[in-house]
Amino acid sequence: MDNPQDLVRDHTIYACVMGSRAFGLATDDSDTDRRGVFLAPTPLYWRFEKPPTHVEGPADEQFSWELERFCALALRANPNILECLHSPLVEHLTDTGRELLALRGAFLSRRAHETFAAYALSQRKKLDADVRTSGAPRWKHAMHLLRLLTSCRDLLRTGELRIDVGDLREPLLAVKRGEVPWPEVESRMTRLAAECEAATARTPLPPEPDHRRVEDFLYRARRASAAQAHADDQAVQGVAGGVRARQG
């Protein structure tokens, strides 16, 4: 395919808004981050050059994954991917996209603690470095780290991933505005990390995600895509045959 963005335009099965707008933390100056999943037509995989695993654009702040790559990352409990699956702001959804959303629970497992915690630790190190070098963290990043840790804790406690912060909106925005002293923010982060650790021992989540269900879904999607491509080819050949018959 000459233009990868055509895959997004023509084959997106799921598209949503992410970032602060999905988290319930948007303000007047917030961007609109769009994320999506496209299903590359199966015949494209029959060539040496394979379809891309992800595509930026065509709109500003838009990023999409090919379905297989998206599922692989979700099975590894990638925080960004899992949150994308649970956005309350869905903008586009096909029948295949509905199947994907119906599988959200199959991607969730105790692995989430490890991946969320690892991401949180990396962000915490960056914030600590900011404090050492400039005397203050990047407050927006501190806010989102608190949000992430809260989301992880509640996921481990309930088995459900909710990304809208609800009643925590104003306390979190106060952190973003720099109105909460850094030692207090640090204390919250430490407490939330400990609560995540404690919740892991009692979580209703299974040890591993349901690989089989996800793989079966991917197989059906690829097979349906191949069947549709074959039907389209037959239709084109039928039209061409009719034209030739009339010309003859």
Image: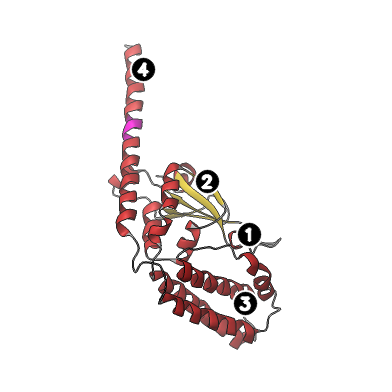
Disc number for residue 243: 4
In depth, the one of 224 and 24 nearer the eye is 24
Is residue 71 something that shows in the picture? yes
- Reading the image, the residue beneath label 3 is 138
Is residue 130 something that shows in the picture? no
- Reading the image, the residue beneath label 1 is 31
Q: Name which residue type carries label 1.
A: Asp
Q: Name which residue type carries label 3.
A: Arg
Q: Which circle's residue, 1 or 3, is located before the other in the chain? A: 1
Q: CA distance from mark 3 to mark 2?
A: 33 Å
Q: CA distance from mark 1 to mark 3?
A: 18 Å
- Is label 1 or label 2 in front? 2
- Disc 1 is placed on an element classified as loop
**Start-end of magenta stretch:** 229-233
Q: Which circle's residue, 3 or 4, is located before the other in the chain? A: 3
Crowd band around label 3 with a 10 angstrom C-alpha radius: few (<14), some (14–19), many (20+): some
Q: Which circle's residue, 1 or 4, is located before the other in the chain? A: 1
> Residue 230 in magenta?
yes
- Is label 2 or label 4 in front? 2
Q: CA distance from mark 3 to mark 4?
A: 66 Å
Residue at 52% across, 69% down = 151
Q: Classify residue 202 by image quadrant.
A: bottom left
Q: Which circle's residue, 1 or 2, is located before the other in the chain? A: 1
**How many numbered marks appear?**
4
- Reading the image, the residue beneath label 2 is 92
User: Horizontally, is 32 left or right of 100 in the view?
Assistant: right
